[in-house]
Amino acid sequence: MNILILGSGGREHAFSWKISQSNQCDQLYIAPGNAGTASLGQNIDMNVNDFEAIAAFVIEKSVDLVVVGPEDPLVNGISDYFKADERLKKVGLVGPSKEGAQLEGSKDYSKQFMNRYEIPTAKSQTFTKENLEEGLNYITSHPLPIVLKADGLAAGKGVIIAETHDHARTTLKEMLLDAKFGEASSRVVIEQFLEGIELSVFVLTDGDNYKILPEAKDYKRIGEDDKGLNTGGMGAVSPVPFAKGDFISKVEERVVKPTVAGLKKEGIDYKGFIFIGLMNMNGEPYVIEYNVRMGDPETQVVLPRIDSDLVDLLTATANGTLDKTEFSVSDQAATTVVMVSGGYPGSYDKGIAISGVDSVSEATVFHAGTKLGENAELLTNGGRVLAITGRGNSVANALENSYNGIANITWKDEYHRNDIGQDILKLID
């Protein structure tokens, strides 16, 4: 089978790594890919939102399965585009319809969906610049801290947690009047702050059936002890010790089942991943947000723990036969630590030479923002550059392997957090 993966980050390298292990994969294409994916398949210089070029390539190369990595093409309707074309409608595509993708594309849409199906989440209201004064008054009466979220896609950076009412009011004005996050913040969801331990649960669904994948906890802040600016993710750990037994049963009954049932009831075509960002509040799950694809860097710890053939699972998702597919998860732990460019998540240089990747033996190196230079040397090409994934019989062992891998790799002004997973270790102890 010929398979095309859309995307260029660490998530797509992890998908490529796992899919290339399947004996069902004859030819693997990654568009546009990175220096890491180039060793597992053929990188194709193609924009993930250029549906016409993607369609032409799929037809020319007889692609059987398309796996959509990032959210943009899903929100822009790539699934609908394929279904509307007679030549493409039989090609398997893992990713929801444009309407289904609104679960991530619009925070307000997802909040309304959760409220309709009584899925536990923070109380909230949505405001635009037309009712700015109402929003400012709402903030004044709101307990602290206050969470402000850009309604649309903001590359994982559209969430502000304000510790004071003044900060919240200033932020609301910046988002609505000054377009702090561009068009994404033309609407702002203001919601209560949920206090507890955050984690993510991942679901693969064919619209009727579902599989709950390994859970993970990621680390969004740039600084240690979860301080500083939000990033796309600085590391992740799986499993999460409390995400089993009674708690995961509550997640399945109160969140997963009503989500899948709600999508079906509303006639929304949804064949793909549902990323459920959760807060564990004293043993009770509350949904922070939905994403409609796998997370990055969570994918780099989730996929290594899946023992089953991923191609089987993805094909069954696209075909609507997920209930007939075997699924098993490893007892091993997986951890990933992200190495970033100096200055990230602000401005940073690109094209800096990276050394030592080939000497890593204790961990798997997933490329996120890399490219090959003119002489095939490995260069930085983004803010998040590499994700170093360790595995082991315990979280502590997996972390040791991740950091041993990092010790081999260097480039000018490289930065990574040294405290990934330490909070998990305390819970285990």
Image (spheres, rainbow, N blue to C red):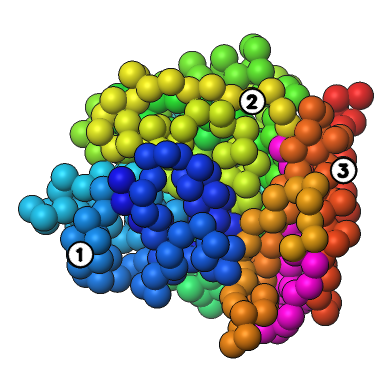
Magenta portion: prevailing SS class: loop
Question: x and y percent of residue 329 in the render?
Answer: 59, 24
User: How many neighbours does mark 1 have within 10 angstroms: few (below 14), some (14-19), or many (20 or more)?
Assistant: few
Residue 103, above or below 152: above
Magenta span of residues: 334-357
Q: Quadrant of the N terminus?
A: top left
Identify the residue position indicated by label 2 in the image: 330
Q: Is residue 16 left or right of residue 146?
A: left
What is the quadrant of residue 175 in the picture? bottom right
- Asked if marks 3 and 1 touch (Cβ < 8 Å), the reply is no
Label 2, secondary structure: give it: loop
Whole-percent x and y of residue 276? 53, 37
Name which residue lies at 25% across and 39% down. Answer: 269
Q: Nearer the viewer, mark 1 or mark 2?
A: 1
Whether residue 355 is in magenta: the answer is yes
Q: Say what secondary structure mark 3 lies in.
A: helix
Which residue occupies the foreground of this view, 233 or 319?
319
Q: Mark on residue 60?
A: 1
Q: Position of residue 106 (x, y in %)?
A: 41, 52
Judge left or right: residue 99 versus residue 334.
left
Res. 262 in view: no
Name the residue that disc number 3 marks.
Answer: 400
